């Protein structure tokens, strides 16, 4: 576990508000090697691109075991800290999730508050915080400070009244921070003013999504972001380029 703990500390230290770490979102050994060879020092494994790569649907269309198989292939291929999007947890208990991730060499996770196995309902604020607390508790018991990125889908799904959505998201993520999260992820595309409010009012480093072919690192840095990931958009951008190349040969 010493190496895993070292990688976990390394990953956490990369989160610097105003000087964000870019974690390219990968889905297999090929894409992981591509990103590491390009000079990136840590990666995140995206559930959506992994699911696409094995012929499954997003939103827990694959199993946790299928995800772990792919993560092990990635950690066998590259020697950098790896964080994994575990969606809503695939119906598993925190102990099983932490054990599975550590077993395949991952040292970070994203946990979202949409429960796909229950009709896509949104967890309550305290319910989500309790899950975060369980993940932190079992990671600590294992001796590895797994970097927990607590995500909310309030903006993505436009849940509730827009007038107080920002307030509700900040309250929800602040509760997750108190429960043991390391990073907070208000997933969605935000205006400059909204992102600045999120990074100034939330008590932990903030993760923002970036479009690899359109977003600007300097702009996100100026907004106070500490972590940038691509979700499925790197895979989408590569697919668009592949389609352009293939079109020439029809």
Image: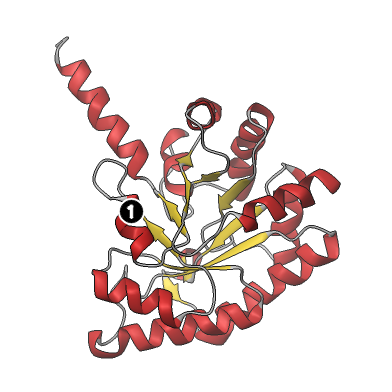
Q: Position of residue 30 (x, y in %)?
A: 51, 25
Query: Measured along the vertical axis of the image, is residue 105 above or below residue 201?
Result: above
Quadrant (top left/top right/bottom left/bottom right) for the C terminus: top left
Query: Measured along the vertical axis of the image, is residue 120 above or below residue 221?
Result: below
Q: Position of residue 128 (x, y in %)?
A: 56, 78
Q: Mark 1 falls on what kind of element?
A: helix
Q: Position of residue 4 (x, y in %)?
A: 77, 47
In the image: residue 167, left or right of residue 151: left
State the residue at coordinates (64%, 44%): 81
Q: How many marks?
A: 1
Query: Measured along the vertical axis of the image, is residue 75 above or below residue 194?
Result: above
| Colour scheme employed for the rendering of this structure | secondary structure
In the image: residue 65, left or right of residue 239: right
In the image: residue 215, left or right of residue 48: left
Quarter of the image holding residue 164?
Answer: bottom left
Which one is in front, 65 or 193?
A: 193
Q: Is residue 1 visible?
A: no
State the residue at coordinates (26%, 75%): 193
State the residue at coordinates (34%, 63%): 222
Q: Which residue is label 1 attached to?
A: 218
Q: Position of residue 96 (x, y in %)?
A: 74, 59
Q: Residues within 10 Å of mark 1 (few under 14, many from 20)?
A: few
State the residue at coordinates (71%, 73%): 134
Q: Is residue 103 visible?
A: yes
Q: Residue extending furthest top?
A: 249
């Amino acid at each position: 576990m010493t190496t895993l703990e070292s990688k976990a500390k390394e990953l956490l230290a990369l989160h610097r508000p105003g000087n964000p770490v870019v974690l390219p979102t990968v889905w297999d050994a090929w894409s992981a090697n591509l990103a590491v060879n390009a000079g990136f020092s840590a990666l995140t494994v995206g559930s959506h691109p992994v699911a696409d790569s094995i012929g499954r649907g997003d939103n827990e269309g694959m199993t946790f075991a299928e995800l772990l198989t792919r993560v092990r292939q990635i950690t066998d291929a590259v020697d950098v800290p790896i964080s994994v999007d575990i969606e809503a947890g695939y119906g598993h208990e925190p102990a099983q999730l932490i054990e599975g991730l550590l077993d395949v060499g991952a040292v970070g996770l994203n946990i979202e508050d949409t429960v796909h196995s229950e009709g896509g309902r949104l967890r309550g604020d305290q319910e989500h915080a309790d899950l975060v607390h369980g993940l932190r508790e079992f990671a600590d018991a294992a001796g590895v400070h797994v970097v927990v990125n607590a995500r909310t889908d309030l903006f993505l799904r436009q849940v509730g009244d827009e007038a107080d959505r920002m307030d509700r998201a900040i309250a929800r993520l602040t509760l997750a921070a108190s429960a043991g999260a390391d990073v907070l992820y208000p997933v969605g595309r935000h205006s400059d003013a909204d992102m600045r409010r999120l990074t100034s009012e939330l008590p932990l480093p903030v993760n923002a999504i970036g479009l690899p072919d359109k977003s600007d690192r300097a702009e996100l840095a100026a907004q106070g972001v500490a972590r940038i990931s691509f979700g499925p958009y790197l895979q989408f951008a590569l697919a668009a380029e592949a389609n352009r190349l293939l079109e020439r040969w029809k």
